[in-house]
Amino acid sequence: MNHRIACVIKNMESMGLTQLLVSDPMSIRYLTGVYVEPFERLYAFLIRTDGEHTFFLNHLFSVADTGYNEVRFSDMDDQIALLAAHIQKGKLGIDKTFTARFLIPLMERTGITPILASQAVDDCRAIKDDEEQELMREASRINDRVITQAFNAAKAGMTEKELADFIDKAFLAEGASGPSFPTIVSVGANAADPHHEPDDTTIKDGECVLIDMGCVYKGYCSDMTRTFVIGQPADPEFTKVHDLVRQANEKAEAIIRPGIPLSTIDAAARDFLAENGYEKEFNHRLGHFIGQTDHEQGDVSATNEALTVPGMVFSIEPGVYLPGRFGVRIEDLVIVTEDGCEILNHVEKKLQTI
């Protein structure tokens, strides 16, 4: 973990910070290997450029020796005073999850100037090391296996909820700890809503079925979408749209390499769909970063001019949505490599009829 903290310290120094209070449990796990779900209680890890890093832990947290300085307290202790005793005057970096009910009293007690510095950690988390990449490959291999099982299980008369439940149970059977987000199964016109929640709508012959799914494997997430059809498509435009969305996905993936603006990747898919008459129907960004959580800081969008770096992992998920009729989305995860990208999903993207 030391190289991860070193990465954060380098970013802190570039921001003119000597101290950073990290409260995001996922970021703390990334940096130290310690995971706690604090709920409403104070939980933080103080990083200092002089190397005097400190954990702030409630006695109720079942945490053994962390290997760092520790300040432990109870619900009855003056926790802000204990925190303030370790904070130096001047600027204090904080992350985006540190709540006002802790920050404001800390400011009143110390007079520190808070600086939003989530980027110091987020920029490090965005570049996955070899261990993280392998965990994400396995999470995607599980995803591939389970969606193949879902294809085989899907049939006319099954409800969206039933198919989503099938997928969630299959994740556990394949070694995942569970879904990385609520599994999306959308049938027919419901697929025109990108974030439709599965309900009692039944699968019918001729209708599309959109499945957006992901799992967690040893703390790392996968995410993938495929859209297929039961029997032959009832809507004559469906096959055309599906093929265009697939091509948009492949065109974006084909240009990924180090040093390319993320906005350029978005444009490769967006411009292609616009040229073919589906500009307004693609109504979301092309992708999001992913790792310990399904959506991490960073995206593949028209407004993100950041350059790709080897080790970045993000989704490529163009979609076309025709309200009242159907929707199509095709999504892969990719890792940026030294000379291109590695696509983590290997399930067929061409239209499958079940």
Image (cartoon, rainbow, N blue to C red):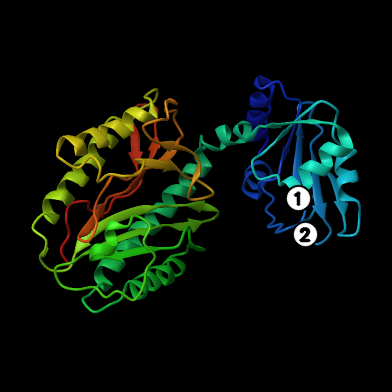
Residue type highlighted by circle 2: Phe
Q: How many marks?
A: 2
Q: Would residue 198 be found to the left or right of residue 45 on screen?
A: left
Which of these two is toward me, 331 or 238?
Answer: 238
Side of 200 relative to 293 (left or right): left
Residue at image location 16% in from the left, 34% down from the top: 275
- Viewer-closest of 306 and 257: 306
Q: Characterize the local packing of mark 2: few (<14), some (14-19) or many (20 or more) Cα atoms within 10 angstroms.
A: some
Residue 43, disc: 1
Name the quadrant containing residue 285: top left
Indicate which disc, 2 or 1, sits on the residue closer to the N terminus.
Answer: 1
Q: Quadrant of residue 165?
A: bottom left
Query: Residue 295 in the image: x percent, y percent?
Result: 48, 47
On screen, residue 342 above or below 35 = above
Which residue sits at x=38%, y=30%? Answer: 262
Measure the C-alpha gap from mark 2 to mark 1: 9 Å
Q: Which mark is residue 61?
A: 2
Residue 207, percent from left and from top: 18, 66
On-image quarter of the C terminus: bottom left
Image location (x, y in percent) of residue 346: 29, 50
Residue drawn at x 24%, y 57% is 323
Vertical arrangement, residue 156 with respect to residue 247, above or below: below
- Looking at the rendered image, the disc whose residue lies closer to the viewer, 2 or 1, is 1
Say which amino acid is labelled 1: Tyr
Q: Are marks 2 and 1 in contact (CB under 8 Å)?
A: yes
